[in-house]
Image (spheres, rainbow, N blue to C red):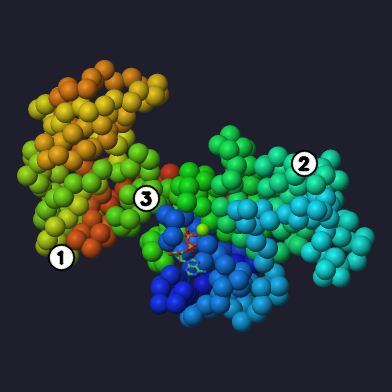
């Protein structure tokens, strides 16, 4: 077991700068996801840690030992790929044991490790089968088993579930979470799926074009996104955004106004804002918009579409300025296409971003703050091997 420290990692392909100075400190036993859109550098970062890519700058430290100069085989890291890359002509037992045989591990020890991995993954009865006689989920388990038998210091998983159908992905997600709990080993998991990242991870690294946009617990990313990129990437349906101007109205308070808004919105901040000149952006999540009576509203719009999902209704609203906002109402909302609706943006749920897209840290209400702190302490407990 070991933590991973990454300092100033740089990677170029030809003239293309793919990783632009990545700094990360991943704790021993932590489950961390790299999350971001396709092409942002997730796989390259993972392969750089594994030693499968030569890096152009910075360093990687595993369990206190600098490993950037070590060949992949000497790094004590196991990687699971998206396409499981099993040997088709070998049965499951051979697939699991092959790497160990190559490394000269004694036969009795190989058998013990294979049987142990098979038991953990519940594939003991499949050991004699060939990969083509297995389902997608079973193959993926064998691929993970190949990593487990090596008993590595660090597991790297690159979108390991993306070839599975939706139902199986959910099952395997739960299995992976349990596996991490049982092994207690540091795992880094690459995904472009925010639900996977948010449900599996102790902390999530959001990557934006080769840079760390934010590294935090799932709830920190959701309630306190540090910039527009994270705010719009995390959460589904997406946060709504409106161009606004702001002025400082109190020691730790901004007043937001816009042509489209009737009245002003006063947003409480965690720290005093300094320079607030220029264009700003207000962000509000769909479930935080309230549909209210006209005299309480900040804005009105026309209903384009109502998606009624039973537990909630997603109301798509065309604003006067031509933008579309989505509001979520609990239960079944009666609005019909063409209706005029009135929107309220409760100040405590408004996110404010400056011209560079950086958020002003909001003052969070006590309930939200305690949710975030609780998640942090649960993960702390998990790392210490205590029951959740
Ligand atoms: N071997 C390579 N040669 C040249 N460009 C590459 C290579 N591998 C990845 N890239 C480029 O690097 C960027 C990041 O790729 P990648 O790390 O695979 O992204 P992700 O895994 O987030 O989808 C992309 O622009 C991709 O086209
Ligand atoms: Mg990738």
Whichever of callouts 1 and 3 sits on the residue coming sooner in the sequence is 3
Q: Is the N terminus in the top left, top right, bottom left or bottom right quadrant?
A: bottom right
Measured Cα–Cα span from mark 1 to mark 2: 64 Å
Q: Could you say whether the residue bearing mark 3 is in a helix, strand or loop?
A: helix
- Residue highlighted by disc 1: 275
On the picture, is 381 further left or further right than 224?
right
Mark 3 vs mark 2: which is more N-terminal?
A: 2
Q: Which residue appears at 72% of the width and 54% of the height?
A: 86
Q: Residue at x 43, y 70 (%)?
A: 18
Image height of 377 relative to 17, above or below: above
Q: Earlier in the sequence, mark 1 or mark 2?
A: 2
Q: CA distance from mark 3 to mark 2?
A: 39 Å
* In the image, residue 297 above or below residue 251: above
Q: Residue at x 23, y 46 (%)?
A: 241
| Mark 2 surroundings within 10 Å by alpha-carbon count, few (fewer than 14), some (14 through 19), many (20 or more) | some
Q: Which residue is mark 2?
A: 133
Q: Residue at x 35, y 23 (%)?
A: 308
Relative image position of residue 316 (x, y in whole percent): 26, 31
């Amino acid at each position: 077991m070991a933590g991973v420290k990454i300092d100033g990692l740089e990677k170029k392909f030809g003239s293309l700068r793919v990783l632009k100075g990545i700094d990360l400190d991943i704790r021993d036993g932590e489950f961390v996801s790299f999350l971001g859109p396709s092409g942002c550098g997730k796989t390259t970062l993972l392969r750089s840690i594994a030693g499968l890519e030569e890096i152009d700058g910075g360093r990687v430290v595993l369990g206190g030992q600098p490993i950037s100069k070590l060949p992949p085989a000497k790094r004590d890291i196991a990687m699971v790929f998206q396409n499981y890359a099993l040997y088709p002509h070998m049965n499951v037992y051979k697939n699991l044991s092959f790497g160990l045989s190559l490394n000269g591990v004694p036969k009795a020890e190989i058998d013990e490790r294979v049987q142990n991995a098979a038991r953990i993954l519940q594939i003991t009865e499949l050991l004699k089968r060939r990969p083509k006689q297995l389902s997608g989920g079973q193959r993926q388990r064998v691929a993970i088993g190949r990593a487990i038998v090596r008993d590595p210091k660090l597991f790297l998983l690159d979108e390991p579930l993306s070839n599975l159908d939706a139902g199986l992905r959910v099952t395997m997600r739960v299995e992976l979470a349990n596996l991490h709990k049982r092994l207690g080993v540091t795992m880094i998991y690459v995904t472009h799926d925010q639900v996977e990242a948010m449900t599996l991870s102790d902390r999530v690294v959001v990557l934006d074009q080769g840079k760390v946009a934010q590294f935090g617990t799932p709830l920190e990313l959701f309630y306190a996104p540090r910039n527009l990129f994270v705010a719009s990437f995390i959460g589904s349906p997406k946060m709504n955004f409106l161009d606004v101007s702001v002025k400082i109205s109190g020691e730790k308070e901004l007043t937001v106004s816009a042509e489209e808004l009737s009245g002003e919105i006063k947003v409480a901040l965690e720290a005093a804002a300094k320079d607030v000149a220029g264009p700003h952006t207000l962000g509000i999540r769909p479930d935080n918009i309230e549909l209210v009576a006209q005299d309480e509203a900040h804005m009105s719009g026309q209903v384009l579409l109502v998606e009624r999902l039973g537990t909630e209704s997603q109301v798509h609203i065309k604003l006067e300025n031509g933008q579309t906002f989505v509001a979520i109402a609990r239960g079944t909302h009666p609005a019909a296409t063409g209706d005029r609706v009135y929107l309220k943006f409760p100040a405590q749920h408004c996110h404010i971003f400056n011209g560079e897209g950086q958020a002003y840290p909001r003052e969070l209400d006590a309930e939200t703050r305690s949710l975030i702190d609780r998640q942090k302490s649960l993960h702390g407990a998990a790392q210490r091997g205590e029951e959740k």
